Image (cartoon, rainbow, N blue to C red):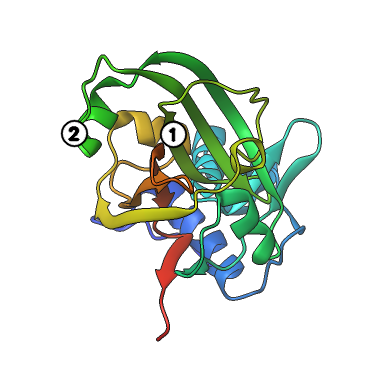
Amino acid sequence: MEKLESRKGAKALYVQIKDIYRRRILEGDLQPGDKIESETQIQKMYGVSRITARQAILDLEKDGMVNRGRGRGTFVIWKPAMSETLEGIRGFTEEMRLHGRQPGTSSWHASTRACGRRMAAAFGLDPEQEAFVVERVCTADDIRIAYIISCFPDGGFSYLGGSVYEETGAPARVEEEFSAQLPDEEVVSSLNISRTLPVLVRKRLGFDSEGRVMEYSLTYYRSDLYSWNRTQ
């Protein structure tokens, strides 16, 4: 068992414990599905307080490494980051299935309302323009991967979570821009990430077969778990 450093200037004890488990997971010593020690066990192993042990586990969960289940324990869920090949037009659900991941929606809200300042700033819209707005936090194997905001100017549809394109049909054509930025509070809260973790941003303008705009969307991805690639 690795020993913790207590010298002046050393990392906080919970960070050292988190780093030990993170390294074991990344190196394959701990595999997806493996159960890690409880807070009490970590407390005794490293001679730290219960609060320190709990904070280490909370940070591992925030990093998408483990999942805590009340009464079940804490299990490793981390898998290598995904890289999306930029070809074709796919939604989040279809993309996850192509990677062999189980797509899900941990939370969502859909209503007809004003597009709001975020979408207005991104697409040059009137912030008071009404549209059917769907906000959702999307997961892969129960890990929060993306926060998606979509505006549909032609009105609402029956949305009960899951794939939006299974309800609307995929756009016939899209225009997209890609960027990276530090997350604001809304994205931090939605993805349960650190304020210092950059997010990748996909700005998508979708058109129907007649060339009319059918969708404005912004997707924020965890940069440590997602990337894009293109082959020519």
Q: Nearer the viewer, residue 95 or 64?
A: 95
User: What label does residue 161 carry, if any?
Assistant: none
The N terminus sits in image quarter: bottom right
Tell me the residue that label 2 is attached to: 124
Residue 216 at x, y = what percent?
Answer: 37, 38
- Say which quarter of the image contains residue 194: top left
- Residue at x 67% of width, y 73% of height: 29
Q: Mark 2: few, some, or many residues within 10 Å (few <14, many ≥20)?
A: few
Sequence-wise, which precedes: disc 1 or disc 2?
A: 2
- Residue at x 64% of width, y 41% of height: 163
- Residue at x 53% of width, y 40% of height: 58
Query: Which residue sits furthest bottom?
Result: 232
Looking at the image, residue 117 lies above or below residue 45: above
- Disc 2 marks a residue whose amino acid type is Gly
Work out how far the residue at label 1 is from the one at label 2, CA to CA, in angstroms.
15 Å
Quick one: SS at disc 1?
strand
Residue 127 visible (yes or no)? yes
- Residue 212 appears left or right of 121: right
Tell me the residue that label 1 is attached to: 150
